[in-house]
Image (cartoon, rainbow, N blue to C red):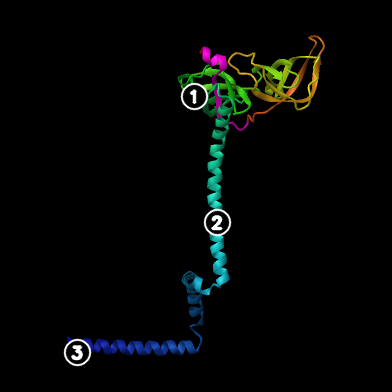
Amino acid sequence: MSTIGIRQTILLVILFVVAAVALIALDSSSALSPLRSGLRSAVDPAISWIDRVTDRNQNQTPLEIQLEQVTKERDELLAANVRLQAEYDALAPIQDILGVQDAHPDWDVLVAKVVNTDPSGLQKLVTIDKGSADGIEVGMAVIDPNYLVGYVTGVDEHTARITLAIDATFAIGAQLLDSKQTGIAYGQWQYGGRMSMKNVSRDVTPKEGEIVMTSGETAKIPPAIIIGQVTGSPTVNNQSDSQTIEILPAANFDNLSLVTVILGFGEDQNDS
């Protein structure tokens, strides 16, 4: 068995020598050049990538290393700033609501989240996530948080429907801030407008930009909530000896997320 093993070893050595000589001969005649080029093109990218990963810092200058560190710190600060801004945006509405409570300590208010809008798109309505179980009743004012948004027109146990002030079915007692003249504010969205104040005496000349606010003459609606401001020229109604004023609403009806329901106020709250 040992003799056979030696013979096999000698044979393998001879074959190796012959193969080596053949490869040397082929290489000297450039016959292996295509194969060598193909292998190099396949292997070189991998070798280059390994070199970049393992020797990246060794090949960088001190300035490049410092620039990379500064860039990394900048990106981390930018990400932190975005997070802080998101947290601030989430807290801002709550801070505004707290400000309303400070300004009106006689108001009993409830914060609610807008969860739905009118699916038909024919009316300006929203649904909130609070209802009769939370003390909400039909007719209560809804603000955002300093301006009038609308009032409650439907209540279930855990949800309520709010008719926005620009809807054509909306009507509320209104008053001009400077002249103290009263009238009724109506929604005009379905008629191509926003809001208008009708039944205003012709004896008063409203000023452009004058504040329009609630008059307190509508049940469950406290006075002095800002509705909007006068815009354009009034339209005179000769038959009723009154004029109609166009109102630019103060609330942003297209971006409602949190609203505040006024559950009670002043004497109305004490009576309840």
Q: Position of residue 56 (x, y in %)?
A: 50, 71
Could you tell me which secondary element the residue under label 2 belongs to? helix
Please name the residue that numbered disc 1 is placed on.
130
Q: Position of residue 214 (x, y in %)?
A: 66, 19
Residue placed farthest to the top in the image?
239
Where are the magenta residues, as a range?
A: 254-271
Eyeballing the image, is 42 above or below 240? below
Amino acid bearing label 1: Lys
Amino acid bearing label 2: Asp
Name the residue rendered at 80%, 17% in the picture.
Answer: 204
Relative placement, left or right, of 236 versus 91 is right
Nearer to us of marks 3 and 1 is 1
Q: CA distance from mark 2 to mark 1?
A: 41 Å
Q: Tell whether position 139 is magenta.
A: no
Residue placed farthest to the left in the image?
1
Please name the residue that numbered disc 2 is placed on.
75
Q: Position of residue 106 (x, y in %)?
A: 55, 21
Could you tell me which secondary element the residue under label 1 belongs to? loop
Please name the residue that numbered disc 3 is placed on.
3
